[in-house]
Amino acid sequence: MWRITLKGVVAHKFRFLLTAVAVLLGVTFMAGTMVFTDTISHTFNGLYSSIYRHTAAVVRARQAYATSSGTERRRIDASVADTVRGLPGVAGVRLTIEGYAQLVGKDGKPLGNPGAGPPALGEAWTDSAELNPFRLLPGGQPPRTSSEIVIDKHSADLGHFRVGDEAVVLTKAAPQTFTIVGIVTFGSADSPLGAGITVFEPATAARLLGEPGKVDQIDVSAAPGATQADLARRIDTALHDPSLEVLTGHQVTKESESSIHKDLSFLNTFLLVFAVIALFVGSFIIFNTFSIVVAQRMRELALLRAVGATRAQVTLSVLGESLVLGVVASAGGVAAGVVLAAPLKAGMAALGIDIPAAGLVVGPRTIVVSMLVGVAVTLAAAVLPARRAGRVLPVAAMREVAVEPTGHSVLRVAVGCLVTLVGAALLSVGLFAHVAHRLTYVGAGAATVFLGVAALGPVLTRPLSRVIGTAITSVRGTTGELATENVARNPRRSSSTAAALMIGVALVALIAVIAASTKASVGDIIDRAIRADFVVTSGTGNPTALGLSPEVQRRIAALPEVSAAMGVRVGPARINGANVYVGAGDPARTSRLIDFGVSQGRLEAMGVDGIAVSERVAADHRLALGQPLTVVFPTTGARTFTIGAIYRAREVTGDYLISLASAEQNFRQQLDFQVYVKLADGVSPHAGRAAIGKVLADYPTAKLQDQTQYKHQQAAQIDQLVNLLYGLLALAIIIALIGIANTLALSIHERVHELGLLRAVGMTRGQLRAAVRYEALIIAILGTVMGLVIGILFGWALVVALSSQGIRRLVIPGLQLLIVAVVAALAGIVAAVGPGRRAARLDVLRAIASE
């Protein structure tokens, strides 16, 4: 039987070709992602091992709790270094100071992409060669005065800087011009993942990046004979301070490596999700291919049963064919994934994320996981066709025509309806019941509804295809009618082919609805809540990525054209056991610049110990005005606040708002996320913009926008993400179109005799090609229509579920969805070009004799 299986694959290799391509594409995406992330991890593992080779211990403050960034710690007294330096076994110490420092290019623009790319960091120089992670390139020297800096090689190359050039650096203080006295690498890399690094002499670093007399941590090198563990214990005993922690160099190295893995985890998960989608879509093609092939080989399989093959042997023979297909396609996908890793690396470099040059790492995990997933998906999709093959009776060998089952069973209808009803019930719970984790119910319900619709596909296909085909028949007559009948007479095949396209179109429609609804909702929030005439943004949608110096707000507020200006800051905290972000503003100015919709209390009355909460949080946690609320900051620990106001408009600063004075005590980063500006009475927008623009000329990361421009910027950020998603989902749609082409090609092979008879009774080659195109068009429209309906339904469900997050408007982008439908239909026609040409080229006499 195994020899028969292999011969079957070889004999029908062209039937499986497009199916193999579908599997190959999904495995390629998966393997490429794994190779890419493994390469980065391996590179930086070696890099950090080299950098911390001589670091025996690290002294730093304990975090009250772990944040997502892992860097939110309070600073410690620099005097701790004096105690550490005098301990036995200590060879040297490095005072580490780190903070925001943005290098400005010669063109007056910030280097890199600080809003969406790697961060811009400042560091303090150390003369300890063993503990210094930076390596000076020849021709440079360390910074020795308050006007000197060294920069990383990546930034130097990007900004065309050389030793001796002058450069402006933005910090939390006013902009300052420095002389570049050296260029450094981060170990062997030009920079850590593309981050811009500016290194100052220690006193300047403390003034511009941190706090005088404070450091972020103390790195310690060991004298000969001292082990890391012993030295760490000795330091911990000597300091005897529970607010401090002492780690060994090995622990810090592992932590740094883990941080890189964590930073890459989102990208890794993001790309792998689309690989899974591609394989899921491909599974429909595999199922279709094997269903058709089994139907076409019914007599052959029956003959095998007649000569003694058991049901199990026939079933295993078909599964063996899928195994061969899965192994070959997955192996090709792994090879193609290795090639794909290079473009992924180039794409990251285009975003400003610099990855050190190194050979690609193709680990055993990548090969094993990619092969297993590809083969498992192929086998799983072929199980039902294989079981159908095993049920073929020997008497079927006497039939003249082998026919694939075309009907739909009562069991299928019952199961499909039951699954759909269960999904609808889960959706209803998530949408209308007061339960926790509403999105979980909505997501589970949406997935279940989709499975139910897929199960009911054959039931829905016949009537829907006839409705769609009516329009084509009215225009193209018999040719259109023939195409309609070809789709309707085999609803199982047509529905599974359409289902592959349905998945991609549904996801596109879902994203389009969510994006349009989000943009409209954000616009409404801006119109309703922002009373300011202008908003100065820091160029990022991430409030903790970078910011504006408080000098920006102070200088704008001092302008005679301005009546009020307020900076808004954001910092991490833990409240009621949940990690959240807390907004901070000036209570005396908030009501003039932002309409928070205060329902209880007064923001203006909040002092340094006051906090305002949203109505949603107050309702969820039964909070009342005047009640104490404990807030745990990662830097300063637990602090008790008194609720001074409750407000509705949580979309501007989140669910919590404290004063700037409190933020200065508890936030590590003292940078404004945004600055809201109200013009003085009688000042025109043009005059106000001109006055503010003069201030912002010194701050190239700042962007001045009126309300309309601010809304457009928010929409543009959403569009960037949506366009990326569309690009990735195109892979699923391409695979679905491959499925249409594959199904039509196999269907033509099955209908050779029929096509020959049509040609014999007068159908022209052009009419035959047209019939195949219209068949593809009906399937494409069928998949597109079902995808649009499901995508819009799921989009509505998510909008309702996200209403508490500020997305309150449902917008269905009709023109955009119409374009999707037209493109999908045209693509279906394109997919039919090859099969149509093949059908038209059939030799009439041979086709008639093929029965």
Image (cartoon, rainbow, N blue to C red):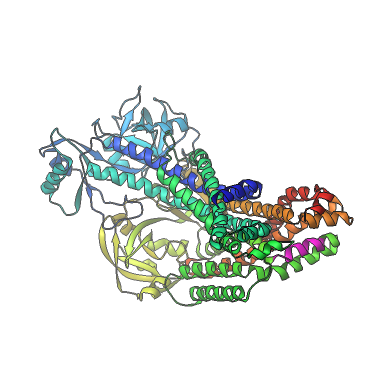
- Residue 683 coordinates in the image, percent (x, y): 54, 54
Q: Residue at x 27, y 45 (%)?
A: 211
Residue 832 belongs to the span the image colors magenta: no
| Residue farthest along the top direction in this orientation | 139
Residue 489 belongs to the span the image colors magenta: yes
Q: Residue at x 37, y 47 (%)?
A: 261
| Residue farthest along the right direction in this orientation | 762
| Residue bounds of the magenta highlight | 480-490
- Residue 55 coordinates in the image, percent (x, y): 23, 38
Foreground residue, 593 or 205?
205
- Residue 851 coordinates in the image, percent (x, y): 77, 56
In which quarter of the view is residue 747 placed?
bottom right
Foreground residue, 94 or 305?
305
In which quarter of the view is residue 645 placed?
bottom left
In the image, is 300 to the left or to the right of 72? right
Foreground residue, 530 or 5?
5
In which quarter of the view is residue 138 placed?
top left
